[in-house]
Image (spheres, grey):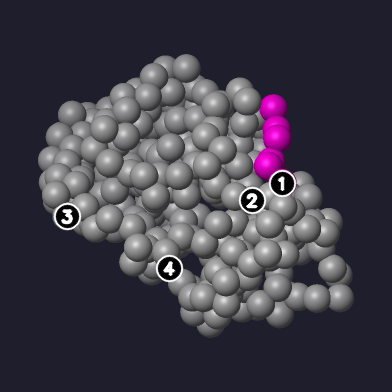
Amino acid sequence: MVEALTEQYNSAEHAVVSQHSNNRFTKYGIKETHKVFWKELDPTEQYDGAYALDILGDSACVDEADPAVSATVEELIDTSREIELEHIDMQALPKKPVFRFIKRLGDIVGSIVALVICAIPMVVIAIVVKLDSPGPVFYRQERHGLMGKTIMITKFRSMHIDSETAGAQWTQDEDARITKFGMFLRTSRLDELPQFLSVLKGEMSLVGPRPERLVFYREFEKYIHGFSQRLYIKPGLSGLAQVNGGYDLLPEEKVLYDLEYIKYSNLSMDLKILLKTFKVLFTHEGAR
């Protein structure tokens, strides 16, 4: 199925490429190395989710989306059109065994060091979270990792316990669901500290696309064909998109950074992303 889409992507009928021009791209300096095709959405046709099926299997198929999810997606994406992204052939990319070994070694050492250094601050954060609002200290949620594998990520709770009673939602600016202390945690990214355990276990990496929920993969894939290609590598605590806009980026913009990283990741790029991550921690750029 994906092979057929790839053939269509390279066909003569798609010879005219429409570059996506947006102020955010200019602001964050995205490299326009990816071909993005724009076409009007035909309401009589339903996208078969070829990319998502290739990675997520039958779980990518649902008859009807949660109304809250659909409403959120409509705020984030122009649903009157579809975007077809370049298909990445993972078999054709360099294997980079040395880079993969160093990256995993760095994940193990980095997560152990971070957990040791942050042990006392994490205890303090846990106490303040408990005192700040009713509810548990930690928030656990299913996300999708490498090749669609379900992983459980843990964060310090930054929202009220009834924050998603109406369904899954994307975090907005000045989101009323966020607690007072939770706002500080999110802008400083300290709510992510427990995820060093996921990095140590090998479910995540220090650098990679941020893990997302299945409900959003399903919906985004309808309008951004190839969005699920983010799952070709392990998700990360930080990533190219996170240090170049984060939540300020729309999904169709964020995925371009993710594809850029998947294709061209190397040790130098990882180090630059990690260094820029420390800067983002202090500037709070792209945080919500």
Q: Report the residue marked by disc 1.
A: 18
The mark that comes first in sequence, 2 or 1, is 1
Q: CB atoms at circles 2 and 1 under 8 Å apart?
A: yes
The mark that comes first in sequence, 1 or 3, is 1
Main structural element of the magenta stretch: helix, strand or loop?
Answer: loop
Q: Does the magenta segment cover residue 22? A: yes
Q: Label 3 to label 4, Cα distance in Å?
A: 22 Å
Q: Secondary structure at mark 1?
A: loop
Q: Report the residue marked by disc 2.
A: 36
Please identify the residue farthest to the front as the structure is shown. 12
10 Å neighbourhood of mark 3: few (<14), some, or many (≥20)? few
Q: Label 1 to label 3, Cα distance in Å?
A: 36 Å
Q: Label 2 to label 3, Cα distance in Å?
A: 30 Å
Mark number displayed over residue 250 = none
Residue at horizontal 43 percent and vertical 23 percent from the top: 280
Amino acid beneath label 4:
Gly
Amino acid beneath label 3:
Pro
Mark number displayed over residue 97 = 3
Residue at horizontal 76 percent and vertical 47 percent from the top: 75
Determine if residue 174 is in view: no
Give the number of the mark in front: 4 or 1.
1
The mark that comes first in sequence, 3 or 4, is 3
Q: Label 4 to label 1, Cα distance in Å?
A: 30 Å
Tally the marks.
Answer: 4
Residue 98 on image: x %, y %? 14, 49
Against 200, residue 253 (above or below) is: above
10 Å neighbourhood of mark 4: few (<14), some, or many (≥20)? many
